Image (cartoon, rainbow, N blue to C red):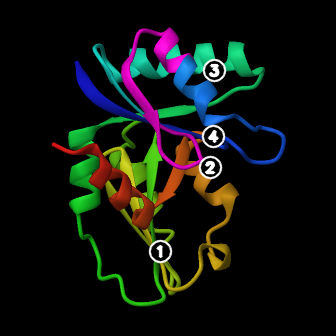
């Protein structure tokens, strides 16, 4: 069994509300062990065997059946998340916002170049495998990146972002 973290896209936004206890029930129903959630934004930690693709697929099918709406899911191992959080692809200063954007699949070399070509004076993107480090010189709501530009490269609903401050706290709770 490997410790995994499932990041659920667009949960608890608008009418797509889910109680975290319900997420625990769903994951336990799939046979996953030591299941817990972290904050109310769709972050589920559990132990499971199997491939990332199989786990993502099982969760997505079960979540849609149980909740009545599609929930794109991005799974990382604890080791992968620790590595991503430890990375320092750029300097982050006071007032900056740093997100980790999780991609559904590893982008091609051309897609990596296209993502990084979106960099501007406010936004900096650095692709690292299936993750993108995204620094904004200010609040995330002030980004200069357009959803359409992002989706033209990675696809619609093929990414989800989390604030690095939250991810560091989550990693701290994972233990060894």
Spatial distance from mark 4 to mark 3, Cα to Cα?
16 Å
Q: Which residue position holds label 1? A: 119
Q: Earlier in the sequence, mark 1 or mark 2?
A: 1
Residue 133: give its label: none
Segment tinted magenta in the rendering? 26-44
Q: Give the residue drawn at x 37%, y 50%.
A: 131
Secondary element under disc 2, as helix, strand or loop, is helix
Q: Position of residue 130 (x, y in %)?
A: 36, 44
State the image quarter where residue 172 is shown: bottom left
The residue singled out by tag 3 in the image is 63
Relative image position of residue 38 (x, y in whole percent): 48, 45
Indicate whether residue 38 is drawn in magenta.
yes
Q: In which quarter of the image is residue 51?
A: top left
Q: In this view, does 116 lie above or below 18?
A: below
Count every numbered label the image shows and give the total: 4
Provide the secondary structure element on which disc 1 rests. Answer: loop
Residue name at image x 28 percent, y 14 percent: 49
Picture quadrant where residue 159 is located? top right
Location of residue 167 with respect to 160 vertically, above or below:
below
The residue tagged with tag 3: helix, strand or loop? Answer: helix
The residues bearing labels 1 and 2 have C-alpha atoms spaced at a distance of 15 Å
Q: Mark 4 packing: few (<14 Cα in 10 Å), some, or many (20+)?
A: some
Q: Is 171 left or right of 24, judged from the image as shown?
A: left
Q: Nearer the viewer, mark 4 or mark 1?
A: 4
Q: In which quarter of the image is the C terminus?
A: top left
Q: Mark 2 points at which residue?
A: 151
Q: Which residue is painted at 28% across and 44% down in the image?
A: 174
């Amino acid at each position: 069994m490997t410790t995994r973290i499932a990041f659920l896209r667009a949960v608890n936004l608008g009418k797509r509300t889910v109680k975290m206890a319900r997420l625990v029930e769903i994951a336990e129903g799939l046979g996953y062990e030591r299941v817990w959630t972290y904050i109310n934004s769709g972050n589920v930690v559990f132990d499971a065997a199997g491939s990332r693709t199989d786990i993502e697929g099982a969760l997505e099918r079960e979540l849609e059946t149980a909740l009545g709406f599609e929930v794109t899911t991005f799974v990382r191992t604890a080791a992968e998340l620790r590595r991503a959080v430890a990375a320092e692809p750029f300097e982050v200063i006071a007032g900056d916002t740093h997100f980790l954007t999780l991609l559904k699949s590893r982008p091609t070399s051309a897609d990596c170049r296209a993502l990084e070509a979106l960099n501007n004076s406010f936004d900096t993107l650095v692709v690292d495998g299936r993750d993108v480090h995204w620094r904004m010189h200010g609040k995330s709501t002030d980004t200069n990146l357009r959803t359409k530009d992002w989706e033209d490269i990675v696809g619609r609903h093929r990414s989800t972002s989390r604030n690095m401050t939250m991810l560091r706290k989550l990693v701290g709770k994972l233990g060894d």
